């Protein structure tokens, strides 16, 4: 096949340019070079894209890191508050039980003292007036315990 001299010259120049040019870069370096070239040519679009990327990264950080961290902190605070309430309730119940036991012991001691004053045994029968008075004192002491520890005072 016979080529036109101009076509042969063009093909020879193209081969020389191809041989002189370094091979195109591949992989991440090529992508970086291409991106920087594009960013230099399209500065406004590059700035808008960078701003959008920053917003997306901040939103992702907020959704993936901040919100779960806040939820975990809230759960820990709720657990501590529940534990504190449980401990306070237990302490209040123990204190109420102790107070009621003390009131009962004092009532029994008063009854025994009244029986001794009459020179009878500890389980003696007292008059209705004395029984009512001792029962009233015991009831007041029990009510005082119940009121004090059911309202959270100690």
Image (tube, rainbow, N blue to C red):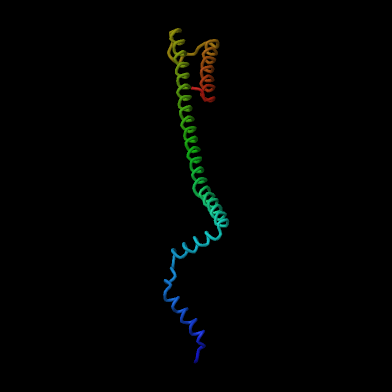
Position in image of residue 8 (x %, y %): 49, 85
- Which residue is located at x 49 percent, y 34 percent? 81
Position in image of residue 125 (x %, y %): 49, 13
Image: 24 above or below 104:
below
Nearer to the camera, 50 or 153: 50
Position in image of residue 44 (x %, y %): 57, 56
How many numbered callouts?
0
Image: 128 above or below 7:
above
Image: 35 above or below 2:
above
Nearer to the camera, 99 or 61: 61
Image: 97 above or below 109:
below
Nearer to the camera, 32 or 14: 14
Position in image of residue 114 (x %, y %): 46, 10
């Amino acid at each position: 096949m016979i080529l036109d001299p101009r076509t042969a010259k063009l093909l020879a120049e193209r081969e020389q340019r191809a041989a002189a040019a370094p091979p195109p870069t591949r992989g991440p370096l090529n992508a970086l070079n291409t991106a920087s070239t594009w960013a230099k040519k399209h500065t406004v679009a590059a700035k808008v894209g960078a701003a959008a990327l920053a917003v997306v990264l901040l939103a992702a950080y907020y959704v993936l890191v901040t919100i779960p961290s806040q939820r975990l902190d809230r759960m820990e605070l709720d657990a501590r508050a529940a534990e504190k309430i449980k401990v306070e309730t237990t302490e209040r119940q123990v204190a109420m039980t102790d107070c009621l036991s003390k009131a009962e012991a004092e009532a029994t001691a008063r009854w025994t003292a009244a029986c001794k004053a009459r020179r009878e045994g500890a389980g003696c029968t007292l008059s209705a007036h004395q029984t009512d008075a001792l029962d009233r004192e015991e009831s007041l002491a029990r009510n005082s315990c119940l009121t004090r520890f059911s309202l959270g005072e100690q």
